[in-house]
Image (spheres, helix red, strand yellow):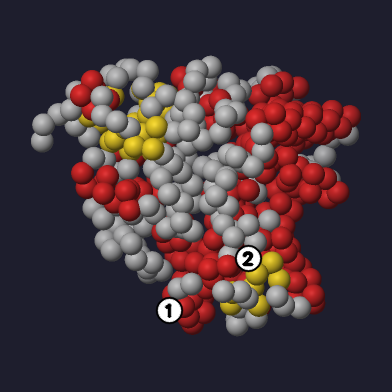
């Protein structure tokens, strides 16, 4: 195959991105690009054009290559969906490269080890059952989003971090605003960010005065006693744990329940063989398109990628949802197969920035779906499917509400 030069490829008119959002389905352009142009030019609503990578092997190549830097994205105009670029905070673990990135991750990694997550599972199951008790007592129909999907991971992350019960709703509103692309103004988005930062700063002050047995206390002590965190790193890390610790999992609980209820053969298989649940969760992580490509990486040198020359300084986005449908890796990639093995999806990323909370998310998703299926074996959508309202103004896909009955 002939090689594109950076100039030739870059001179093409970029495709408008993100592509269409239809429920949890991939835009057909992804499959077309994987076949014909796995590294292509795109233009997001804000910022300069970027390279979009849609192929599985090339996605892993970018995510694992230190020449594609997250830290280099700080302090510049980046391709993005919303006017405010809150992801480019220098002290954010998302915006760091090793060794700084490794230092920050090591401080919180012990809270999310497989052993620690396994210790949390009985409590997660208790919370899930309690939420379903309330939902069943109130009677059908119920909105899964407000009654269960958000409550479960919010309670778990709040208990892990040490957030008071009464503060959960306030911080959820601020967190939602920071993930919006159009429903709030840039001023409101910035305001929500500052409210969240101020709230956490107050909690850190409390932990200094009255240490507890929670993750926030551990981070404060790492800052004060070991000098392994700056004050701003402490604040940004606390915010990242709070928002990332529940928002994505909450959306996925609803998305996966929706997927099960719209794939009756797979739902029946799971009811008949509950042991397939871990594999079903992995397959739905692979199968469902969850969000568009965000968090650009900046090439720090000229790099040849899939016969395209990426010039130093150019931003690169990886469409992991597209990579997860790559037929070269996933046979019958457009089919939902709970027995798929192996299933090396990249829903949690790859390389140094592999999702820190992946173990916790997997456990919560398995507990949530397992509890729903065991307690509500007749669960079904309570309204015509076409009447469901989907978020189309946030970076993450999901249902605004999900009325179910049983």
The residue pinned by badge 2 equals 402
Q: Quadrant of residue 171?
A: top right
User: Which of the numbered marks, if any, corresponds to residue 289?
Assistant: none
Q: Quadrant of the C terminus?
A: bottom right
> How many numbered dots are placed on residues in this image?
2
Residue at the (33%, 32%) spot, across then down: 14
- Residue that numbered label 1 is attached to: 265
Which of the 4 quarters of the picture holds residue 400?
Answer: bottom right
Label 1: how many Cα within 10 Å (few below 14, some 14–19, many 20+) = few
**Quarter residue 82 falls in:** top right
Residue 326: x %, y % from top left: 29, 52
Q: Is residue 38 left or right of residue 227?
A: left
Q: Is residue 250 visible?
A: yes
Q: Nearer the viewer, residue 10 or 296?
A: 10
Measured Cα–Cα span from mark 2 to mark 1: 21 Å
For the N terminus, the quadrant is: top left
Secondary structure beneath label 1: helix
User: Dot 2, crowdedness within 10 Å: few (<14), some or many (≥20)?
Assistant: many
């Amino acid at each position: 195959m002939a090689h594109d030069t950076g100039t030739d490829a870059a001179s093409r008119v970029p495709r408008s991105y993100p592509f269409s959002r239809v429920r949890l389905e991939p835009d057909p352009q992804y499959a077309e690009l994987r076949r014909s142009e796995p590294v292509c030019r795109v233009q997001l609503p804000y910022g300069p054009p970027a390279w979009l990578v849609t192929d599985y092997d090339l996605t892993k190549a970018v995510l694992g290559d230190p020449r594609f830097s997250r830290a280099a994205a700080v302090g510049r105009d980046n391709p993005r969906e919303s006017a405010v670029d809150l992801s480019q905070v220098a002290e954010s673990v998302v915006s760091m490269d090793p060794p700084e990135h490794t230092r920050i991750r090591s401080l919180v990694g012990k809270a999310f080890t497989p052993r620690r997550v396994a210790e949390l599972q009985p409590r997660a199951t208790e919370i899930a059952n309690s939420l379903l008790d309330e939902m069943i007592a109130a009677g059908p129909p119920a909105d899964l989003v407000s009654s269960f999907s958000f409550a479960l991971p919010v309670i778990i992350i709040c208990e892990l971090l040490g957030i008071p019960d009464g503060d959960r709703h306030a911080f959820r509103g601020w967190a939602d605003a920071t993930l919006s692309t159009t429903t709030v103004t840039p001023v409101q988005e910035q305001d929500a960010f500052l409210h969240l930062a101020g709230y956490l700063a107050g909690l850190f002050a409390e932990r200094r005065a009255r240490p507890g047995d929670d993750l926030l206390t551990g981070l404060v002590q790492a800052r004060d006693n070991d000098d392994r965190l700056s004050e701003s790193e402490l604040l940004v890390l606390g915010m990242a744990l709070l928002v990332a610790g529940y928002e994505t999992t909450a959306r996925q609980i609803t998305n996966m329940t929706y997927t099960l209820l719209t794939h009756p053969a797979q739902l029946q298989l799971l009811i008949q063989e509950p042991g397939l649940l871990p594999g079903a969760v992995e397959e739905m992580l692979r199968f469902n398109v969850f969000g568009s490509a965000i968090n650009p990486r900046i090439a720090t040198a000229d790099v040849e990628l899939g016969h395209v020359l990426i010039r130093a300084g150019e931003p690169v986005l990886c469409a992991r949802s597209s990579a997860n449908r790559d037929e070269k890796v996933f046979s019958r990639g457009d089919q939902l197969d709970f027995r798929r093995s192996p299933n090396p999806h990249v829903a949690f990323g790859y390389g140094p920035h592999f999702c820190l909370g992946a173990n916790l998310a997997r456990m919560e998703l398995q507990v949530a779906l397992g509890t729903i299926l065991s307690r509500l074996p007749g669960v079904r959508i309570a309204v015509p499917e076409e009447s469901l309202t989907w978020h189309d103004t946030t970076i993450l896909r999901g249902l605004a509400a999900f009325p179910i009955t049983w």
